[in-house]
Amino acid sequence: MRLLLMSDTHLPKRARELPAPLLAELPRADVVVHAGDWVDEATLDLLEGASRRLVAVYGNNDGPGLRARLPEVAHAELGGLSFGVVHETGSAQGREARCAARFPDLDVLVFGHSHIPWDTTTATGLRLLNPGSPTDRRRQPYCTYLTARVDDGRLSDVVLHRLPPR
């Protein structure tokens, strides 16, 4: 099972549209994960229409329309692993312990908010993934997204993709 993970698209404030390399990944993905801060409903409509399966949440910058359509926390069983998706996890300091305590039954937690790519594993074995942002690099050198594979209860081939400057 091939996964496409993104967050913090902030359209149309940070970019007019999703980058072409990210859009090219959509037909290849079995599941698309979006960890919030869409800003516009058109991006949600696009991903719902183009994805085989979408697992998504709203973020702190998402208004009432998106909040009515999306949960704050999403859960999905993907390829034998228990995934969770949430926008905010708090500061980087203490993140692993906080997330392990809050989500003890998950194998993988995808989050956003910081626009900073993140890939760590907690002491309890919870994998934490933040794909960064494909449209707003903030203090990062590149805009980014993640792809990964899940097969037989194993997460593999987690790749951070750097997007070319606009």
Image (cartoon, rainbow, N blue to C red):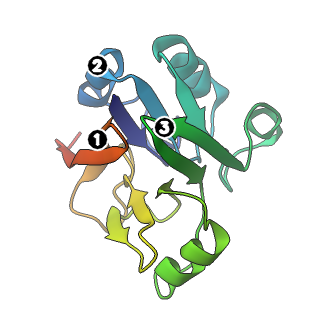
Sequence-first tag of 3 and 1: 3
Residue 45 location in percent, x, y?
Answer: 61, 19
Whether residues under marks 2 and 3 lie with C-beta atoms below 8 angstroms apart, the answer is no
Whether residues under marks 1 and 2 lie with C-beta atoms below 8 angstroms apart, the answer is no
Q: What residue do we see at 63% from left, 33% from top?
A: 40
SS type, badge 1: strand
Q: Amino acid at mark 2?
A: Arg
State the separation of the CA atoms marked 2 and 3: 13 Å
Q: Quadrant of residue 41?
A: top right
Q: Which mark is residue 148?
A: 1
Q: Quadrant of the C terminus?
A: top left
Front residue of 66/76: it is 76
Sequence-first tag of 1 and 2: 2
Q: Amino acid at mark 3?
A: Val
Q: Amino acid at mark 1?
A: Ala
Q: Which residue is mark 3?
A: 33
In the image as oriented, which residue stretches furthest toward the front?
152
State the separation of the CA atoms marked 3 and 1: 11 Å
Front residue of 103/45: it is 103
Q: What residue do we see at 78% from left, 40% from top?
A: 67
Sequence-first tag of 2 and 3: 2
Q: Which residue is mark 2?
A: 28
Q: Quadrant of the N terminus?
A: top left
SS type, badge 2: helix
Residue 17 location in percent, x, y?
Answer: 42, 28
Front residue of 63/158: it is 158
Q: What residue do we see at 21% from left, 62% from top?
A: 141
Q: What residue do we see at 33% from left, 56% from top?
A: 137
Q: Residues within 10 Å of mark 3 (few under 14, many from 20)?
A: many
